[in-house]
Image: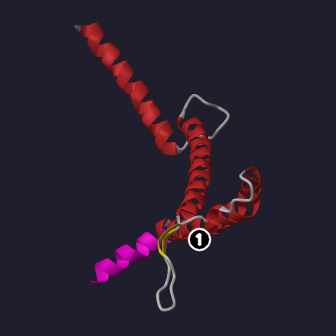
Amino acid sequence: MKNFFQEFKNFAIKGNMIDLAVGIIIGTAFNKVVSTIVSAIIMPPLSLLTDDVNLSNKKWILREAGEKVEEVAIGYGELIESLIDFGIIAFTIFVMVKFINRFKEKSEDPTNKEVETPKNIVLLSSMEKLLKEQNAILKGKK
């Protein structure tokens, strides 16, 4: 049990849990921002273009409301708004990951002098050079 707590402590201290928590918090806040942008900025002009059709109110009524019966309906307008939200979030994440990967590729290139290369990449690069030299020497002996 003591090892379990030690392992959890190492996990939390190394930043994995903290990074995950920060990512979830930022993602939740970003989702709210995008939802607000879609519902307050994108959908009103879209409703003007479609003769004041408000998508969030669009639904297929399966059963009309009666005196003692609630309405049963499928809200396809809300689904369309959610798909627009998803598209914006997915595109934004795609652009951010592409941007981050560009810098990651630069930092992993040992010949690139603009960005400081991590020590493990430098070590692997020098090992690769040594192996190439060794292979050239061994091929020359044959």
Of residue 94 and residue 106, the one placed in the foreground of this image is 94
Where residue 78 appears, as percent x and y from the top left, is 57, 65
Q: Which residues are magenta?
A: 1-14
Is residue 12 covered in magenta? yes
Q: Does residue 11 appear left or right of residue 100 in this picture?
A: left
Residue 11 painted magenta: yes
Question: How was the colour assigned to the protein in this rendering?
Answer: secondary structure
Q: Does dot 1 land on a helix, a strand or a loop?
A: helix
- Looking at the image, which residue is at 59% across and 64% down? 58
From the image, tell me which residue sits under label 1: 25
- The residue at the point 40 percent across, 32 percent down is 127
Question: Seen from this angle, which residue lies furthest bottom?
Answer: 68
**Total residue callouts:** 1
In the image: residue 124, left or right of residue 87: left
Percent position (x, y) of residue 5? 35, 81
Residue 56 spot, x, y in % from top left: 63, 66
Q: Is residue 134 above or below residue 56?
A: above
Above or below 90: residue 142 = above
Does residue 30 appear in the picture of this structure?
A: no
